[in-house]
Image (cartoon, rainbow, N blue to C red):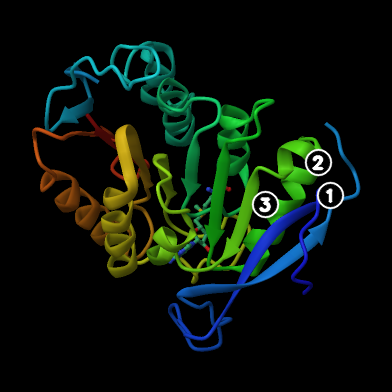
Amino acid sequence: MASVMNSSHIRIRLQKNLKFFFFFSALPPPSLFPSKLLSIPTTKPSNLAHFVAQNDIVTPVQTPHTNSSAKHNESPFQGLECVMAGYMFGKKKATQVAQAVWKNVVRKGDTVIDATCGNGYDTLAMLRLIADDTRRGRVYAMDLQKDAIESTSSLLERSVSADERELVELYSMCHTKMEELIPHGDVVRLVAFNLGYLPGGDKKIQTESETTLLALQAAERIVGRGGLISIVAYVGHSGGREEFEIVQSFAAGLAVDSWVCCKLQMLNRPFAPVLVLLYKK
Ligand SMILES: C[S@@+](CC[C@H](N)C(=O)[O-])C[C@H]1O[C@@H](n2cnc3c(N)ncnc32)[C@H](O)[C@@H]1O
């Protein structure tokens, strides 16, 4: 657990201090406070608008409008017909729709947050959106579980160059504390939540309504204009439906003049993951 960083290392922060137990006390005690810097050597550089269809709904709470901050000058929901139809017909996952929206919002050099990095697929997608030669962009990725941090680290090692990995900071911590990671003055373009449990991991360790709400409130404070909070919610597991309801209430309460809030949900597949998108105008 060295506290040194250099160009061939991925930065990982581990917690100390406050203990935080999820579900049962035998779980590793992740903290709410990131503190200790860890580095893992990396050896192998390599490289909505209104939309209603039968059985499906996309429910905007507010109507999107042109925003000069949006990447393509139009709505962040532009050009999504294919991926949305894919989702509706069971050929695309909600996470793929989410990533397609990110492409419309995130620019090279941006600061973005993966609030639940898990196995790293979302982190990798974000890294590809922000990385360029200026090396200004950053992905702050976090997870309660060390296994998830290691899994993400390993995926990055296999997928991108050492230079690109340097743009990712991995933290073993609760996402309620995400604000502490962002340097003063930095504007966050995207905060992404992929709720639930780690695929292939302990299903008892999952996101929980109370902390998810706190993390959403933190995300609301740090996302800049033209930025997005993206949430994939799973309603099929215990506690998932309640958590989704919390996410919905949070979204419905955001100010109409500042936020466009919508969801993509299947009506006749009640356990299908739901995508909630909160775009700051
Ligand atoms: C569905 S997985 C995320 C998948 C991931 N985005 C990917 O691309 O592989 C949900 C993750 O959230 C993590 N998690 C649960 N509660 C958390 C919390 N309070 N803070 C940060 N991560 C949390 C879990 O450990 C789990 O790895």
Give the residue type at disc 3: Thr
Q: Quadrant of the C terminus?
A: top left
Residue topped by disc 3: 152
Task: Please name whichever residue, 207 or 64, is drawn nearer the observer in this view of the structure.
Answer: 64
Q: Where does the image place residue 59, in percent across and percent down from the top left?
A: 17, 30
Compared to residue 25, the image places residue 39 above or below, namely: above
Q: Quadrant of the N terminus?
A: bottom right
Question: Foreground mark, 3 or 1?
Answer: 1
Which is more N-terminal, label 2 or label 3? 3
Q: Residue at x 36, y 44 (%)?
A: 231
Residue occupying the far right of the picture = 43
Compared to residue 78, the image places residue 279 above or below, namely: below
Give the residue type at disc 1: Ser
Residue 162 image label: 2
Which is more N-terminal, label 1 or label 2? 1
Asked whether the residues under the numbered discs 2 and 1 touch, taking CB atoms below 8 Å apart as contact, a structural biologist would say yes
Which is more N-terminal, label 1 or label 3? 1
> From the Cβ of disc 3, is ligand 1 less than 8 Å away?
yes
Classed neighbour count for the residue bearing mark 1: other residues with Cα under 10 Å, few (<14), some (14–19), many (≥20): some
Q: Where does the image place residue 86, in percent across and percent down from the top left?
A: 43, 19
Q: Where does the image place residue 239, in percent across and percent down from the top left?
A: 32, 65
Report which quarter residue 200 is drawn in.
Answer: bottom right
Measured in 3D between alpha carbons, the distance from the residue under mark 3 to the one under mark 2, in whole angstroms, is: 14 Å
Q: Tell me, yes or no, if residue 207 can be seen here.
A: no
Residue topped by disc 1: 8
Measured in 3D between alpha carbons, the distance from the residue under mark 2 to the one under mark 1, in whole angstroms, is: 6 Å
Asked whether the residues under the numbered discs 3 and 2 touch, taking CB atoms below 8 Å apart as contact, a structural biologist would say no
Give the residue type at disc 2: Ala
Report which quarter residue 171 is drawn in.
Answer: bottom right
Q: Residue at x 62, y 57 (%)?
A: 170
SS at circle 3: helix
Classed neighbour count for the residue bearing mark 3: other residues with Cα under 10 Å, few (<14), some (14–19), many (≥20): many
